[in-house]
Image (spheres, rainbow, N blue to C red):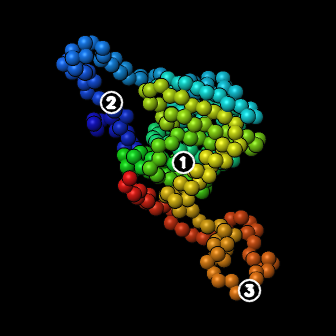
Amino acid sequence: MNDDNVNDNGLNWDVELDFGNLEFEEEFLSDNKDRYHNPKPYKGIKDKFVKYSHATRAANYIEIGDGSRSHMVTAGSFEFGDFIEALLKERNAQVKHMSVSTLSMSQNNIDSFANLLHDGWVDKLDLIVSDYFYAHERKALVPYMMHELDHENRFQLAVAGSHTKIAIFETYGGKKIVMHGSANLRSSGCLEQTCIEENAELFDFYMDFHNAILEEYSVINKPIRHKKLWQAVQNNMQATTPTDPKDVPQDLDGEEQSPSPPAVNPKPHSKR
């Protein structure tokens, strides 16, 4: 690693993937009478080919309507995180709640989510990343993510042993969109496939799945609102008399909160 290429956020973008010699042993090829041949050398992606414009074209091309389903096969230069941002902006879709799970992501993906949150395209964002990603980026991209996304209590992060690549969101127009496939948020250098569909039943299924992970493995402590706090207290008390509805405190302004610290460390995962 060359320290000269580390930016102000402590991130090094001068990373080269060197997988070493991928060729078979000559003896193996000879013994099998040339039935096999060596894989072609990998060609890296030049920065200029990883562009938002690719995602914009895709966002304009696919069909999204009631019950629609589109399938995409994309080149390694395609960045799925850019596609999510482009899809909302090109279709002028404002989102109540977006929930995303990914193995890994880039600083560009974080900046894209920041644009969506700060510019009013997304009201609430939940993000699930792998413990593999967290272990490698806990001193770089993870603090950067918190700084850019954790504002006004609209963002939650969970760290779990997950390999899923799912993005779901509900628009103010009533559409429940599901995107799932092989692609992480960042470009991979590999062919990827993605399915985008308007499917309320599948949306609810994946939302329950994501919420179960967030409930157990979220790392941002959020204040408990008054009404929810009162319900938690009631559930942990032995009721001696029936509760009169008029005696239950009401959450009139929706803003009353109990204090709590901003974050906790991720929960460890049991070895499989």
Q: Is residue 112 visible?
A: yes
Q: Say above or below: 37 vs 204.
A: above
Camera-nearest label, 3 or 2: 3
Q: Residue furthest top?
A: 34
Q: Residues within 10 Å of mark 2 (few under 14, many from 20)?
A: few
**Which residue is labeled 2 in the image?**
17
Q: Real-space Cα distance between discs 3 and 1?
A: 42 Å
Q: Residue furthest front?
A: 32
Instruction: Write the residue at 55% across / 38% down.
Output: 112
- Dividing the picture into quarters, in which one does residue 4 lie? top left
Q: Quadrant of the N terminus?
A: top left
Camera-nearest label, 3 or 1: 3
Q: Position of residue 91 (x, y in %)?
A: 70, 32
Q: Which mark is residue 241?
A: 3
- Type of amino acid at the residue the image marks with label 2: Leu
**Which residue is labeled 1 in the image?**
127
- Type of amino acid at the residue the image marks with label 1: Leu
The kind of secondary structure element at disc 2 is: loop
Which of the pair 261/25 is nearer the observer? 25
Q: Real-space Cα distance between discs 2 and 1?
A: 27 Å
Q: Real-space Cα distance between discs 3 and 2?
A: 67 Å
Which comes before the other along the chain, label 3 or label 2?
2
Q: Position of residue 66 (x, y in %)?
A: 76, 34
Q: Position of residue 10 (x, y in %)?
A: 36, 44
Which of the pair 217/251 is nearer the observer? 217
Which of the pair 237/266 is nearer the observer? 237
